[in-house]
Image: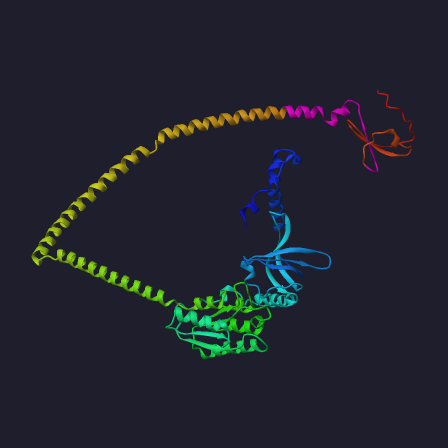
């Protein structure tokens, strides 16, 4: 795809530079922006319709329209996709196309870029294919962790396909060219038609029971979805997953996918590709053998050189017994000297360390007289601080006592005041409104109290004394 489709929209820079109405956009840039927006907005989808104006160009591209009763749209299918189509549409055919909505920029025409085409009705088979694929995938049959690696050097290769299939000739030709030394065993089974899935399953189980091959190729040529439907069988998929021998699936063309492809240990795009995956190429094996032989020869030569060098080194180390004894005596004298010096050195080191420790102890020894004088001075300071604090607290207590004496209720009574207390509730009387004839009161005075009963009450306003 042209990289210009992913370039920033020409309207974005214009909007940043000024009013949108003042931006001048070339037609090519406008069409490119529209095409990019269409491709981002509309995902790949299946569209149905009737074929009209079908043309195959010299380049191999297909140009046609699909229509229904209300509308039509132009379509293009490029050669790279058209060559894998299962059939060539004709005028009036009812088809379904898997396409991307885009625009042909030079003419500004809306079109569908077709990737796959099928006859109407195949959608139901495809839906059944998707349901079975989802079911088996949920069960873990397609789990990559379950799949096994193919043998690097198989002793025998098994092929399950029809004896009349063109795919068998392609596989045998490829195996003969790449690995003529590896025997091939063919397990014949029909690859199309009623009962073919059961026979393919039976052949796969027979190959596992006979255990005479190291890898199995399950293959057939291309065809429509109906032609390949035997390879979408659930029993065959489960047999592939349960196979004790690695299975390579080479069914149809590169764009064809079946349930067997997902269940197999390896999926090849074509039968020929499957044969190439399971067969080590004889020329490459011989070349690798030559390389390993040369590497082994070089390694052996280097080993002999190292051994010869080691032998020369050992020969140089070889000395006479008399010389060896002389060397040992000299070494013994050196050890005796070192031992004597080591004993005297240890005593000198210990004496030096003792002197250092003694000096440090002298410096660190405390002065008892000075510390005693300091403690006595601190005691005198503490006594003085306590005495001053007692004086301050005594003065403070005297002041608080004087204040308390001034505020004492007894002093208030001594100035001629009295307190009236309700004899029943014990509450102080503050208002003449609560005084009633016959009400009993307790009167507190400076020199005692008395219980009284009111004979008559004449309330007066609070006009002072």
Using the rendered view, name the quadrant where residue 222 is placed.
bottom right
- The residue nearer to you, when weighing 247 against 306, is 247
Q: Residue at x 22, y 61 (%)?
A: 301
In the image, farthest residue toward the left? 322
Q: Position of residue 21 (x, y in %)?
A: 67, 35
Using the rendered view, name the quadrant where residue 374 is placed.
top left
Looking at the picture, does residue 235 appear above or below residue 95? below
Instruction: Specify whether residue 462 is painted magenta.
Output: no
Q: Position of residue 312 (x, y in %)?
A: 15, 57
Q: Residue at x 12, y 54 (%)?
A: 328
Q: Residue at x 18, y 46 (%)?
A: 342
- The residue nearer to you, when weighing 96 against 135, is 96
Residue 42 in sight here: no
Q: How many marks?
A: 0
Residue 377 in sight here: yes
Using the rendered view, name the quadrant where residue 447 is placed.
top right
- The residue nearer to you, when weighing 308 against 274, is 274
For the C terminus, the image quarter is top right
Q: Position of residue 9 (x, y in %)?
A: 60, 42
Looking at the picture, does residue 128 appear above or below residue 302? below
Q: Is residue 174 left or right of residue 119?
A: left
Q: Position of residue 199 (x, y in %)?
A: 54, 78
Magenta-drawn segment: 399-425
């Amino acid at each position: 795809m042209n990289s210009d489709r992913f370039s920033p929209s020409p309207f974005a820079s214009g909007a940043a530079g000024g009013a949108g109405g003042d931006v001048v956009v070339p037609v090519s840039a406008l069409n490119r922006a529209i095409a990019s927006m269409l491709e981002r907005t509309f995902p790949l989808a299946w569209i149905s319709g009737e074929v009209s104006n079908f043309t195959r160009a010299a380049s191999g591209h297909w140009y046609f329209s699909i229509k229904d009763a209300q509308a039509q749209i132009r379509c293009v299918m490029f050669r790279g996709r058209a060559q894998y189509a299962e059939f060539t549409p004709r005028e009036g055919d009812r088809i379904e196309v898997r396409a991307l909505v885009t625009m042909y920029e030079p003419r500004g025409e809306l079109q569908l870029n077709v990737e796959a085409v099928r006859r109407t009705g195949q959608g139901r088979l495809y839906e059944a294919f998707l349901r079975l694929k989802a079911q088996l995938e949920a069960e873990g049959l397609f789990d990559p962790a379950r799949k096994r690696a193919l043998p690097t050097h198989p002793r025998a290769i098994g092929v399950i396909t029809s004896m009349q299939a063109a795919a068998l000739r392609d596989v045998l030709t490829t195996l003969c060219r790449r690995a003529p030394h590896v025997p091939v065993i063919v397990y014949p089974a029909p690859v199309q038609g009623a009962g073919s899935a059961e026979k393919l399953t039976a052949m796969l189980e027979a190959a596992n029971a006979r255990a005479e091959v190291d890898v199995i190729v399950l293959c057939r040529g291309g065809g429509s979805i109906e032609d390949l439907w035997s390879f979408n069988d659930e029993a065959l998929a489960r047999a592939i997953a349960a196979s004790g021998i690695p299975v390579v699936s080479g069914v149809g063309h590169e764009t064809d996918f079946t349930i067997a492809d997902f269940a197999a240990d390896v999926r090849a795009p074509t039968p020929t590709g499957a044969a190439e995956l399971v067969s080590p190429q004889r020329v490459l094996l011989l070349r690798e053998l030559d390389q390993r032989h040369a590497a082994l020869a070089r390694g052996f030569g280097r080993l002999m050189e190292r051994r010869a060098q080691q032998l020369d080194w050992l020969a140089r180390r070889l000395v006479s017994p008399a010389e060896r004894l002389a060397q040992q005596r000299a070494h013994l004298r050196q050890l005796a000297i070192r031992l004597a010096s080591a004993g005297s050195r240890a005593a000198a080191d210990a004496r030096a360390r003792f002197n250092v420790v003694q000096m440090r102890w002298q410096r660190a020894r405390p002065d008892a007289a000075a510390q005693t004088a300091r403690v006595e001075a601190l005691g005198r300071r503490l006594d003085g601080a306590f005495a001053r604090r007692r004086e301050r607290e005594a003065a403070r207590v005297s002041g608080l006592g004087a204040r308390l004496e001034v505020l004492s209720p007894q002093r208030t009574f001594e100035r001629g005041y009295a307190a009236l207390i309700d004899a029943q509730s014990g509450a102080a009387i503050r208002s003449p409104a609560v005084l009633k004839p016959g009400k009993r009161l307790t009167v507190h005075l400076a020199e005692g109290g008395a219980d009284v009963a009111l004979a008559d009450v004449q309330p007066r306003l609070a006009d002072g004394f």
